[in-house]
Amino acid sequence: MFKVIEKCPLCGSKKWSKIIKNNKNIYSFFLAKILNLNEHYILNNLKNFQCSNCTLIYKKKWPLRKYIKKIYSDHQPNHPGGLNTLKKNFGKKKLISLINKYKDFAYNKNYELCEKSKREIIKILNSTENSSKNFIKIKNYFIEKLNSDNIDYVNKNYLIISNMIKKPKIYSQFSGFRSNEISEYLRSTIKLKNINSYAEIGCPLWGNYDYFKKSWIKRYFIKINEVNFWKVDRKKKENCIKYLQKDIKVASNLNKIDFVGIYNFIDHLENPLRLFSNVFKDINYYGLICEDYNLSKKIDCQHFSSWNYKSLSFLSKKIGFKIADKPLRLGNSIYKYYILKKNDK
């Protein structure tokens, strides 16, 4: 059910400096269900190891391909983070709808759907842009009662908290990676007039297409068949690709492109070097957004790796690039933005 990763997929070293546990989430639940194993056993087997040489954090055990496929075909076929950037998936109306579903599932003792509704409710509450002490106090207490399935409390108080939901936090999964902060960072690091083509990989709904929406810039989405990621397929219901702007062309690969955005994607790759050797040939800049373990203090079990400045520097040298500037921490979030520039630029 698991295969063993003998050496670091980035530098090839077999030495490691520390072990990091996984964060329990819906994907550890899915794997436990698929493999018919205890969730704790899954989390323990998928521990993360930090390479002593390049400092990449990666998993030394990884589910066999057929089990990963089941996650992204049967259990979570669409990318929830991408779809959550759509306005209909955040706000007072959506929260009330989720709470009503939760109550129905709880009364009918449908444990799995009940837990799913709770996760989605908590996700909205924790992603709400409201820093008032009153909201934080009410939110934390509401989540506590929700997690303990105090249905009476939830029923009496859900309208109070729903009226406090206005807009999502920047860089939450309900916002994606679009901001004036990122635009300013790009403006200070690259000359937009020299960019004639821009492409993204990963999720069609998470990136910076709007910043590159200029008359002289051709924009693309590169469709990559990665087993450990959500598929983009116009035939599938509620798939992120259906919401891609109409003037953005979808391609399987692009040999020559000026700037490629890779946002929250590289940590899903079992063989990250293959992406840069097989898919991309003539690129001038890469923009990478990665979750920083030093900020989040967690790693999710569906992420094969976790990256930092040293591991991305190692990657850059390996592919003939360099980190162009000091990475940008995105607001007060757990994410950092890196721009990699070709050495001859």
Image (cartoon, rainbow, N blue to C red):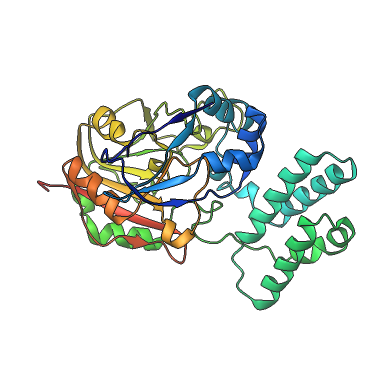
Image height of 73 relative to 157, above or below? above
* Spot occupied by residue 86 in the image (x, y as percentages of width and height): 58, 46
Q: Considering the image in quadrants, where does the N terminus appear?
A: top right
Q: Measuring from the top left, give residue 324's x and y in whole percent.
A: 21, 55
Q: Residue furthest bottom?
A: 133
Q: Nearer the viewer, residue 72 or 166?
A: 72
Percent across and percent down for residue 301 are: 53, 42
Above or below 227: residue 328: below
Visible in this render: residue 27?
Answer: no
Say which of 52 and 235 sits in front.
Answer: 52
Compare residues 54 and 74 and report the one nearer the observer: 54
The answer to whether residue 332 of the structure is visible from this angle is yes
Q: Please give left or right for residue 331 compared with residue 280 in the image.
A: right
Q: Image quadrant of residue 104?
A: top right
Depth order, front residue of 10/232: 10
* Residue plotted at (89% across, 40% down): 108
Where does residue 276 sit, x and y in percent of width and height?
A: 26, 35
Tell whether 310 sits left or right of 160. Answer: left
248 lies left or right of 148: left
Q: Number of marks in the image?
A: 0
Q: Is residue 146 above or below residue 9?
A: below
**Horizontal arrangement in the rendering, residue 228 relative to residue 144 (left or right):** left
Question: Which residue shows up at 39% across the image and 49% down it?
Answer: 208
